[in-house]
Amino acid sequence: MRILFTGGSGKAGRHVIPYLMDQGHQVLNVDQQPLDHPGVDNRIADITDAGQMHDVMHSLMNLGELDEGTGVQGFDAIVHFAAVPRILITSDTEVFRVNTLGTYHVIDAAVKAGVPKIIFASSETTYGICFAQGERKPDYIPVDEDHPTVPEDSYAMSKVCNEATARSFQARTGADIYGLRINNVIEPHEYASLFPRFIHDPDQRRRNIFAYIDARDLGQMVQRCLDVDGLGYQVFNVANADTSVAAQTSDLIDRYYKDVRQTRDMDQFKTFYSIEKARDLLGFAPQHSWRESRDLLEK
Ligand SMILES: NC(=O)c1ccc[n+]([C@@H]2O[C@H](COP(=O)([O-])OP(=O)(O)OC[C@H]3O[C@@H](n4cnc5c(N)ncnc54)[C@H](O)[C@@H]3O)[C@@H](O)[C@H]2O)c1
Ligand SMILES: O=C(O)[C@H]1O[C@@H](O)[C@H](O)[C@@H](O)[C@@H]1O
């Protein structure tokens, strides 16, 4: 497929783009800085500028396409990851402006260019827990896509707003638009640097509902979304199948979620961040876990 990927130079994109290219896709990365990866095409553009987003949707991927002389071929799918990825990087108002306006322009330009599949990065913060003041618990566990999304912070508000924007564009156009409520992204090298602290101190993972997503498994999730057509507007939780801490799930419930309603039985290390919808509708099956690392297990 010909894929236009926004924000591909960032933490998640620099793993997802190589994953997609390994599956045989051609990728144009639209970002404010280029991704240095063999074979990827880059375009410097700002998602908050409508003109630039309409331009890139009708653009060649690279100079080589001039020689082919076939003109603009368009895109089969958009993967939209560009964003300010949390609060406290810039002002709250800027986080909200960039993320909401940028997402409007990307989806508006994509549907007007007739792109049939749009996948966009939402976030686990939509459930309100991640950047809440003090401690906030889920209404029930495991947290699935039916859980209320009532966040307190501008980043999560921007993601909830983007989901409304995406749903409206889907209703108007019939394109397939899938939102990924991505949990905390972990790059492969971060198992060694972060997990020695995480696994024995569950307090550090409370705000992420104790979950995580391996950047390579996020690549698989995007591929599954590209594979499955016809679902209209959907949101999917995206996480690994286990928790990011050493304690058993039952111990975590005793310590953190004693007063929280439990809707299903949960086995030994099962995540509180339900990925059953992605498994059932898309066949998502995460391949990686920090538990594969013998060094970490022995610590
Ligand atoms: N990292 C996580 O744990 C996590 C978790 C859930 C959701 N997400 C979401 O996934 C996506 C990717 O996150 P990330 O961690 O890779 O973030 P990142 O900040 O590492 O990457 C974002 C990329 O977007 C680009 N960008 C920012 N503003 C732009 C603009 N105006 N125009 C064009 N490009 C712009 C940046 O240059 C950067 O390369 C984001 O939408 C983020 O909200 C991330
Ligand atoms: O920086 C972080 O940890 C957070 O980044 C945000 O982008 C994600 O939405 C959230 O899941 C992460 O935990």
Image (cartoon, helix red, strand yellow):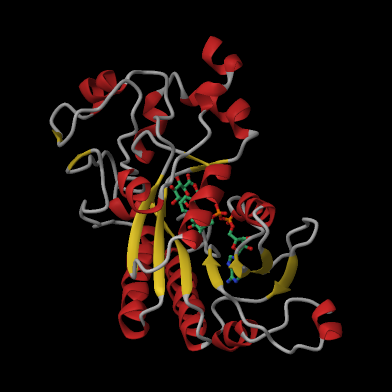
- Quadrant location of the N terminus in the rendered image: bottom right
Question: Residue at the location (45% across, 41% down)?
Answer: 285
Q: Is residue 299 visible?
A: no
Relative height, residue 238 to residue 271 (above, below): below
Question: 128 or 111: nearer the eye?
Answer: 111
Question: Residue at the location (52% across, 35% down)?
Answer: 287
Relative height, residue 75 to residue 192 (above, below): below
Relative height, residue 281 to residue 290 (above, below): below
Q: Position of residue 58 (x, y in %)?
A: 63, 87
Q: Is residue 121 visible?
A: yes
Q: Position of residue 18 (x, y in %)?
A: 68, 52
Q: On the rendered structure, is 19 left or right of 91? A: right
Question: Residue at the location (28% across, 56% down)?
Answer: 151
Q: Position of residue 249 (x, y in %)?
A: 30, 23
- Quadrant location of the C terminus in the rendered image: top right
Q: On the rendered structure, is 202 left or right of 197? A: left
Residue closest to the far right: 67
Q: Quadrant of residue 62?
A: bottom right
Q: Quadrant of residue 142?
A: top left
Q: Position of residue 101 (x, y in %)?
A: 46, 77
Relative height, residue 19 to residue 69 (above, below): above
Question: 136 or 281: nearer the eye?
Answer: 281
Q: On the rendered structure, is 287 left or right of 141? A: right
